[in-house]
């Protein structure tokens, strides 16, 4: 009976890590279940606090339509004081389970997920939120290659507020 209980618990744990967080909307557009993604990433944060360097498997779409599993871990880039001030801004990195030459770097914040996938031969793919005019469409993402990247006339937007100190120093 104990063996059966352990086997069931292991099966449930494996199933819980196999959430399908992406659904295809059309050829290059995907819907992301941000709630499920946050659950996946929360598992990493919990593991990082107890064991440094732990990772979890998260799937991401490629521009050609295939889904790739990546072993992902949190990759903090902010100073700890700044990270405390902006706890919803997190950065992650990972490596494909099936192709060690394929890497992912992504961030998640209140504006959504922004990812860059690189692989052998300088192939670069981006996963970014879809915009309708100047508004981001919630949970809707486009996957494109660098060669198909377009700006659609968008100008670079900076959401950083300058402080009086920075303005005086002409930074």
Image (cartoon, rainbow, N blue to C red):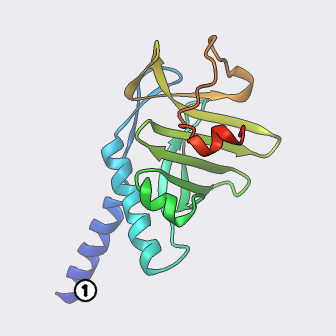
Point out the residue furthest to the right here.
121
Q: Is residue 97 visible?
A: no
Residue for point 16% across, 87% down: 1
Q: Residues within 10 Å of mark 1 (few under 14, many from 20)?
A: few
| Front one among 134 and 35 | 134
Residue 13, position as x, y percentages in the image: 31, 68
Point out the residue furthest to the front here.
168
Left or right: residue 131 compared with residue 96: left
Left or right: residue 155 compared with residue 28: right
Point out the residue furthest to the left here.
1
| Front one among 119 and 9 | 119
Residue for point 55% across, 37% down: 160
| Front one among 67 and 37 | 37
Residue 158, position as x, y percentages in the image: 58, 31
Query: How many callouts does the rendering have?
Result: 1
Residue of label 1: 3
Secondary-structure class at tag 1: helix
Residue for point 30% across, 46% down: 35
- Residue 80 in the image: above or below residue 65: below
Q: Is residue 135 visible?
A: yes
Residue 33, position as x, y percentages in the image: 34, 40
Q: Quadrant of residue 122?
A: top right
- Residue 143 in the image: above or below residue 51: above
Residue for point 57% across, 58% down: 78
């Amino acid at each position: 009976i104990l063996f059966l209980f352990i086997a069931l618990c292991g099966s449930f744990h494996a199933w819980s890590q196999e959430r399908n967080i992406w659904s295809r909307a059309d050829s290059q557009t995907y819907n992301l279940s941000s709630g499920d993604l946050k659950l996946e990433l929360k598992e990493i944060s919990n593991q990082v606090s107890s064991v440094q360097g732990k990772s979890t498997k998260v799937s991401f779409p490629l521009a050609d339509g295939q889904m790739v599993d990546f072993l992902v871990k949190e990759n903090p880039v902010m100073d700890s004081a700044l990270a405390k001030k902006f706890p919803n801004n997190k950065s992650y990195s990972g490596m494909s389970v099936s192709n060690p030459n394929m890497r992912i770097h992504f961030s998640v914040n209140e504006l959504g997920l922004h990812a860059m996938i690189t692989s052998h031969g300088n192939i670069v793919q981006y996963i970014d939120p879809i915009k309708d005019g100047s508004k981001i469409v919630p949970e809707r993402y486009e996957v494109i290659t660098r060669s198909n990247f377009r700006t659609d006339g968008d100008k670079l937007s900076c959401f950083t507020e300058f402080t009086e100190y920075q303005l005086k120093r002409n930074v």
